[in-house]
Amino acid sequence: MTDMTLVTSGLWSMMRHLWHDQRVWLASVLILVALLIFDSLQAAESTVFAGKALLNTAPFLILSIAIAAWAGATGADNLIARAFVGAPLLMIGLGALAGAISPFCSCGVIPLIAALLAMGVPLSAVMAFWLASPIMDPSMFVLTAGVLDLEFAVAKTLAAIGLGVVGGTVVHLLMNHRAFTDPLREGIGNGGCGGATIRAPKPVVWRFWIDIDRREEFGKTALGTTLFLAKWLTLAFILESLMLAWIPAEAVTATLGGQGLLPIATATLVGVPAYLNGYAALPLVGGLIDQGMAPGAGMAFLVAGGVTSIPAAMAVWALARPQVFALYIVLSLSGAFVSGLLFQFWSAIPI
């Protein structure tokens, strides 16, 4: 083999490794460069949008990252994991309830999800929390009650809890048949049914900073989680900004008019790539309901859009293995459709 062949082979191998490790960052850069060439104004707007979105989620991200790093450094992850062992159905219910009332957004909850799975918390309880969290939180409840009505806010909260319970139960039944023993992608963590920390417990050292190895573990976990989230959320927010700029909100929501099952099914599917966050979607859905759109279609759109929006879905894809992501999407869509049907039935009952 000639020297030139060796050099070429080495460069090709280096490029492959660079693309594999940094492909998400490179994708974001390439999108912004293309925008800068063809639409410089949109490039600036997308950059500002992504920056503001990252700043808005920063408090939740910092809290979640700190919890994950602290648990790993102290060894408290073993205690947390053991708290979820022995009563899976109870944990599923508590996970769904916690998700519905927690203030975490769909992005801010991701490092907490990763930490729980890495600690060995069963995927069933985590999935219940994961599904319920993006749909409802305290501020969303108040805003929904104000923009739509209290009945809609209560129904959406029940939908969040119900979707979490059903989704967690489905995962629990599948886990009983040896499914999802390792739900996280390679390199993200070592979670699963039973969990690494339960299989190999380690002593808890609350004052972890006095131990150099544990300090290093804290820093490594915090840095790794931060970089992982930064690259995926940056790409997600850039894509979201482009959808906001290029696809009018009215064009999406205007397809949801009419009565019967078809509008509910359509609303569920339209909600999959929904670029509207829950707050922006409320007044548009409220206006369409006033113009005759079925309330069930509005409910299906809000539930599906919350769980499968671009930032939420990309975060799940980046964190979990493909089969877990596929189940997440299936549960989200079916749950949104059923929620819409039930709310439509309830709304039709004369009071």
Image (spheres, rainbow, N blue to C red):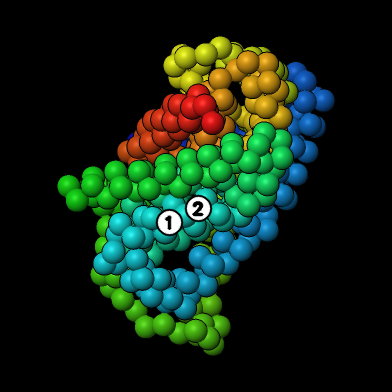
Check residue 116 in the rendering and tell me which mark sits there, or answer none.
none
Q: Which residue is found at the position 45% from the left and 19% from the top?
A: 265
- Type of amino acid at the residue the image marks with label 1: Gly
Quarter of the image for the C terminus: give it: top right
Residue at the spot of label 2: 99
For residue 87, side relative to residue 26 (left or right): left
SS label for mark 1: helix
State whether residue 58 appears in this view.
yes
Which of the labelled discs sits on residue 95, or is there none? 1
The CA span between labels 1 and 2 is 6 Å
Would you say the residues marked 1 and 2 are in contact, meaning their CB atoms lie under 8 Å apart? yes
Q: Name the one closer to the observer, 291 or 306.
A: 291
Q: Is residue 22 visible?
A: no
Neighbor class of circle 2 (other Cα within 10 Å; few <14, some 14-19, many 20+) is many
- Residue 312, horizontal then vertical, whole percent: 54, 40
Q: What is the count of numbered marks?
A: 2
Left or right side of 33 for 301:
left
The furthest residue to the front: 351
Mark 2 lies on a secondary structure that is helix
State the image coordinates of residue 1 (x, y, percent, origin top left). 35, 36
The residue furthest right is: 41
Figure check: 98 above or below 334: below
Mark 1 burial class by Cα count in 10 Å: few <14, some 14-19, many 20+: many
Identity of the amino acid at label 2?
A: Gly
Q: Residue at coordinates 34% horizontally, 60% vertically from top-left? A: 90
Residue at the spot x=56%, y=61% of the render? 64
The residue closer to the viewer here, 6 or 309, is 309
Front residue of this view, candidates 103 and 283:
283
Q: Position of residue 127 (x, y in %)?
A: 39, 49
